């Protein structure tokens, strides 16, 4: 069965960087794009960007350009999201999600369990 | 930028019908998806391509999209349907989420 398993919770100081992993199993990793979405406590879902695991090409939301880097290691079926220059308002649960594409129509059909990133001094 | 607007909350009695609207400019020309999120859990897709239900999603969930509004309808709402619901559509190759609607089953 399809699974996306994310790395564990992180506590970081302001200005530091965090790297979250998302290990895929149960399907061909390179065949589906991966999205990264975050959610601050009590808030809605915020799209950060996505990456094509086959080409490695990412696309980032304007808000995060310059601070976020999305990469992958196809040999182990794992996607990564690194966010730098962390601020207190980056405290959130970060999700990876698989993109299902069908003739131009997309949705996220599988989600990771989420990774809590806490920015605290 | 493209925005999707949802009501913050919807209340429904058990067994009744809950309708959640998602409004956006010419949304009917796009494909809408809906995600259910229960406290402490990851989102789960309950509707995609406007009106398609993934396997495992109960038949009481249905969807439509026309004009400027996509609608998720829960018929015969059960207590287990209490959750936050988010609509999503794509604009200019970017996925956009609505602000979310909290469905309370009273």
Image (spheres, helix red, strand yellow):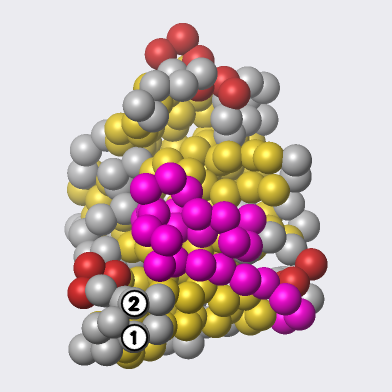
For numbered disc 1, what is the local secondary structure? loop
In the rendered image, residue B33 lying in the magenta stretch gets the answer no
- Count of labels shown? 2
Q: Quadrant of residue B48?
A: bottom right
Of all chains, the one bearing label 1 is: B
Furthest-top residue in this view: A75
Query: Residue A56: where, in percent of width, then height?
Result: 62, 25
Q: Residue at x 51, y 59 (%)?
A: B47
Q: Which residue is mark 2?
A: B76
Q: Residues within 10 Å of mark 2 (few under 14, many from 20)?
A: some
Q: Residue at x 40, y 76 (%)?
A: B75
Segment colored magenta: B43-68
Query: Residue B62: where, in percent of width, then height?
Result: 51, 67
Regarding residue A24, the answer to whether it shows in the image is yes
Q: Quadrant of residue B101?
A: bottom left
Frontmost residue, B3 versus A27: A27
């Amino acid at each position: 069965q399809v699974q996306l398993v994310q790395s564990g919770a992180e506590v970081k100081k302001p200005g530091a960087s965090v790297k979250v992993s998302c290990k895929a199993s149960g399907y061909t990793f390179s065949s589906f794009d991966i999205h990264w979405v975050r959610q601050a406590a009590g808030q809605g879902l915020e799209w950060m960007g996505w990456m094509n695991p086959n080409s490695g090409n990412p696309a980032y939301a304007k808000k995060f350009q310059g601070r976020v880097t999305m990469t992958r290691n196809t040999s182990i079926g794992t996607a990564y999201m690194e966010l730098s220059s962390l601020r207190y308002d980056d405290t959130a649960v970060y999700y990876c999600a698989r993109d299902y594409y069908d003739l131009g129509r997309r949705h996220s059909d599988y989600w990771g369990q989420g990774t809590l990133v806490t920015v605290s001094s | 930028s493209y925005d999707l607007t949802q009501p913050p909350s919807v209340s429904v009695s058990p067994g009744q019908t809950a309708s959640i609207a998602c409004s956006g400019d010419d949304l009917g020309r796009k494909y809408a998806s809906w995600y259910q999120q229960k406290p402490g859990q990851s989102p789960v897709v309950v509707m995609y391509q406007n009106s398609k239900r993934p396997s495992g999603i109960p038949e009481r969930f249905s969807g439509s999209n026309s004009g400027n509004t996509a609608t998720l309808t829960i018929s015969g709402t059960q207590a287990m349907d209490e959750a936050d619901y988010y609509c999503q559509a794509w604009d200019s190759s970017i996925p956009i989420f609505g602000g979310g609607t909290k469905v309370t089953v009273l």
